[in-house]
Image (cartoon, rainbow, N blue to C red):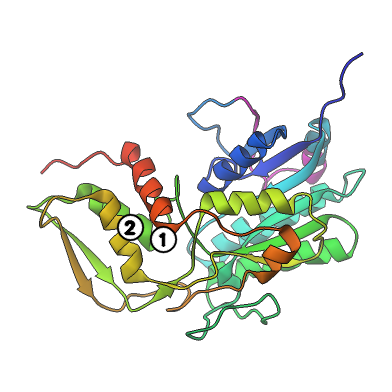
Amino acid sequence: MTARREPAVAVFGATGCVGRAVTAAFVRAGRPVLEVARHRPPYAGDNRFLALDAAAADPGELAGLLAAARVDTVVNATGGWVTGEAENECAHVHLLENLLAALARAPGRIRLVQIGSVHEYGPLPVGTAAEETRPPCPVSAYGRSKLAGAEAVLRATRAGLVDGVVLRVVNLCGPQAAEVGFLGAAVRRLHAATSERPAELTVADAHRDFLDVRDLAAAVLAAATAPVAGQVINVGRGEAVPVARLLDLLIAAAGPPPGAVRLRAAPVDSRGGDWTQVDIGRAARSLGWRPTVELPESIKDMWDASRADHPVEQP
């Protein structure tokens, strides 16, 4: 008698830093994973892989592919920082609407975990930990498009088309996150830094809520089965850390030679204001989740994982 296969999890954006961490978390939990991305990655894995542009795919064809793979859970980890209204609209709204149209054709309601962003809230007053009840007011094209995507998921859930939940996520660090944000820029400069050509790092008077990408993956794993349909749930460390502290941790992990780093205090243009912090009480109550990876460990792992991709530049 042939054993019945367990339903699979489809991870869209599986080759990005979030998608890779989420895939690894489901595999460790014993779930079959269908990795979906536009291009097959150079690394070889044991999971099924589907090379597909979800924004351009026909919803009916996509629905058939997911049904053939016996998918009952979808994680949307696509997108990222892009420039321009049209580019953000395509990456974060059109793609998701296409995916929702495909999931609406499924014979049963599929759990959709949408990876949202703290930037959906817009700039936060200093000292504020944003709760999910806070009215969103994004000011960037990225934040507006991510909010539009989140609202599309919630509308489809209310209409009974999907079983969706939105995780509103803060800044990320940890393995494979080295290209993201100001920490990613600092990583690149530190790899090229020498005593003769020091890296100049700007220390802004700002605070950021940073989370290890593996902690985010644990939250996604919990959200895949928890009774949280129709909810928005903040996922972060729940603390605003000074940028200077984050850079200190990165420099300590990098161990640059003497004189290879110069710090200067100056304001910098920020995509989300000078303060980000979220309240994570709902995540603890609804998902049974709290972050477990401390920032020193996360940033050291971020640096260590980046070394293969950043050969030292020669003078």
The quarter holding residue 14 reads top right
Q: Amino acid at mark 1?
A: Gly
Q: Which residue is mark 1?
A: 181
| Left-right relation of 24 to 198 | right
Rendering coords of residue 202 (x, y %)? 26, 69
Q: Are marks 2 and 1 in contact (CB under 8 Å)?
A: yes
Q: Is residue 179 visible?
A: no
Residue drawn at (67%, 82%), measured in percent from left and top? 135
Q: Which residue is mark 2?
A: 185
Q: Amino acid at mark 2?
A: Ala
Which residue extends farthest left?
196
Q: Badge 1: how crowded within 10 Å, few (<14), some, or many (20+)?
A: some
Q: Badge 2: how crowded within 10 Å, few (<14), some, or many (20+)?
A: few
| Left-right relation of 306 to 291 | left
- Whether residue 52 appears in magenta in the rendering, the answer is yes
| Left-right relation of 162 to 90 | right
Q: Determine whether 140 is above or below 88 in the image.
A: below
| Left-right relation of 34 to 2 | left
Q: Which mark is residue 221?
A: none
Rendering coords of residue 232 (x, y %)? 72, 67
Magenta residues, start to end: 46-62
- Whether residue 49 appears in magenta in the rendering, the answer is yes
For the residue pair 56 and 294, the one nearer the viewer reads as: 294
Residue drawn at (54%, 55%), measured in percent from left and top? 292
